[in-house]
Structures are given as structure tokens and as C-alpha cells.
Amino acid sequence: MKTDRLIGILSVLLQEEQTTAPKLAEMFEVSRRTINRDIESLCMAGIPIQTVQGTGGGIRIMDGYRVDRTILTSKDMRMIMAGLRSLDSVSGSRYYSQLMEKLQAGSSEFLVGRDSILIDLSSWYKESLAPKMETIQNAIEDAHMVQFHYYSPSGEQVRRIEPYYLIFRWSSWYLYGWCTDRNDYRLFKLNRMDQVQETEQRYERREAPLPDLSDEKIFPGGIHVKALFDKDQKWRLAEEFGPDSVTETEDGKLLFTADYTDLDNLVTWLMTFKDKAEVLEPLEARERIAEAVKRMSAIYGE
């Protein structure tokens, strides 16, 4: 992405006395024209960059301009490296690795000892996730529409989106953008997206608001759940809803209470516990599970 590349170029200029556009273009895997535009963007941001033409010329930051890195502690640098490494876990290119190498080369005095934080954002889907993210990042930078097949409870659809943000939330990656079918902003889960393509169609960037990713907005609740679980299921309830979601009854069972958003998902979730759970409320969920057990008994009873 352009912002990431600008940070990388600035890092190179702060560490090297002088460099060239061809060298930067090769380093960041873009054209010289793109590097020239990036240099203009840095100048407009107030960075005093000087370019010298001819033999021995190049690009450099004017004498006397330095960023005081003493404001960064060793812990600060380790946190920055942990963040970059986490992005590299889902990157389809070597960009973040290259950026880490640049930071390490100029900040070795800050990076002592072993890393204590290791983050992998790719989950189980790295091979399919990285190409999607790279395509979407390029489309955002180029202001191009993206098209993809999307799988949802209502069926499979082809969607065309003005992409604005890639978001990691609730242990998954999402695309946030303007949906031309719904004429509104929508959130799409990357694992449900297939055949993701950057189209040639450009779009005029909107003043896209930051998405409201609060749990209350995405998971509004509304279905009060009460269920009894076997005691050996406490680890799972604590993992998914927190230890405060259960209380132990006199007979050794676990009384679970929480709010849920979707009845179908609730029934599916409860059935994953098989005979170790009994739903008390809502009554409709109890009835649906009873019907499902009857149908399954008919299938497997033979």
C-alpha cells in the first residue's frame, strides 16, 4: 500500500546518505514513475528531500534533518517489529520482511534479547488468504472496483465493491467497502470470498466513515440463552464467552447465561456439544434441537 511504501522510503532515506530512484523502484517492486510520485508526496508532507541529476546524483534528505530515534525505547522497537511480523504472516509479498530488514539494519542497538510476542494473523487460511489480501490492497491503492463470489446464508452471489478497508476482527479478516448492489457500506468476510479480482473500473473515493466494529453493533444480542452443561465443558464456555458466563449448580452442572444474535447459529452451536448440553431458554431453540434429533435418529437409526 502507498502509505506503507512511503514509510519504507523515508526509513531508507534516514539511514542512507543517498539513494536513487531505480534502486528504490527495485527495492519496493514498483516503477520509477511511482517512486517519483512518492517522493513528491513526501515533499508535500514537509520532508525536505533533495534530488540531484546527473552522474553521482540521487535522492537524499537535506543536511540537518533527522528524526530523533531516542524517543523509541527497546520495547517500542520490539513492539513495532512484532506488528510488522504479524502483517508478514498474511502478506502475499516480501514487503514487510524487507521493511523489517531496513528497521533492523538501522536500529540494532534497540533490538536486543529475544522476541516475547509472536503473532500469526493467517489462521488456517494463509495460502488462500494472502492472494486475496494482496489483490484488495492493490485495488484500494489504485481506486479500482473489486469483484468476487460471496457465500452467505442466503446463497452464492457475485458482488462488486468499492474497497476501503481491510480489517482483522473477531479472529477473522474482513473487507469493508461500498456495495453497488446494496448502495450502502458492507462488511465481507474474506474466508467466504472466492475468485477475487481487481477490475479495470475506477471509482471516485468517497469520504468513507470508519466502520463501527463494536460488539454491540455487529452482535446486537436480543436472544437470551439459558442452558445446562456438563462440568467438563467449562473450558470451552470460558474460551468462547468468558468464565463469568457460567455458574455451578448444586448438582455439579454448569448454568450458562448469555445473549445471542441469531437463532439458527445458536441451535448449531448448541448441537456441537451433543449430549453434554441442555438448552432451557429460548423454548424455540429447544424445540428445533428436538426436531433435529428426531431427523438424525431417522437417518442413523437404521
Image (spheres, helix red, strand yellow):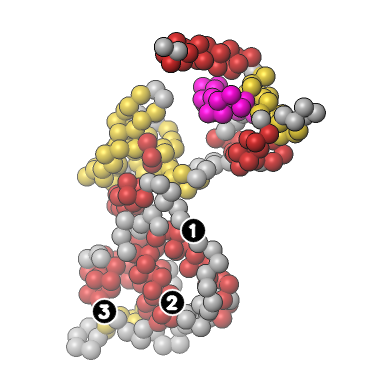
Left or right, residue 37 beside residue 240 = left
Determine the residue positioned at 25% across, 70% down.
25
Could you give the CA–CA distance between mark 2 and mark 3, rounded to whole angstroms?
21 Å
- Checking the image for residue 119, the label placed there is 1
Residue 262 belongs to magenta span: yes
First in residue order: circle 2 vs circle 3: 3
**Rendered image quadrant of residue 244:** top right
- Badge 2 marks a residue whose secondary structure is helix
x%, y% of residue 107?
A: 47, 80
- On the question of residue 144 being in view, the answer is yes
- Whether the residues at callouts 1 and 3 have beta carbons within 8 Å, the answer is no
Q: Quadrant of the N terminus?
A: bottom left
Extreme residue toward the front, this view: 302
Which class describes the residues within 10 Å of circle 3: few (<14), some (14-19), or many (20+)? some
- Checking the image for residue 229, the label placed there is none
Considering only vertical position in the picture, is 38 above or below 111? Answer: above
For marks 1 and 3, give the one nearer the viewer.
1
Left or right, residue 236 beside residue 52 = right
Q: Where does label 2 land, which residue? A: 104
**Rendered image quadrant of residue 281:** top right
Determine the residue positioned at 71% across, 34% down.
246
**Which residue occupies the foreground of this view, 205 or 240?**
240
x%, y% of residue 254?
A: 71, 31
Amino acid type indicated by mark 1: Ile
- Badge 1 marks a residue whose secondary structure is loop
For marks 2 and 3, give the one nearer the viewer.
2
Considering only vertical position in the picture, is 299 above or below 157? Answer: above
x%, y% of residue 29?
A: 25, 65
Could you give the CA–CA distance between mark 1 and mark 2, rounded to whole angstroms?
18 Å
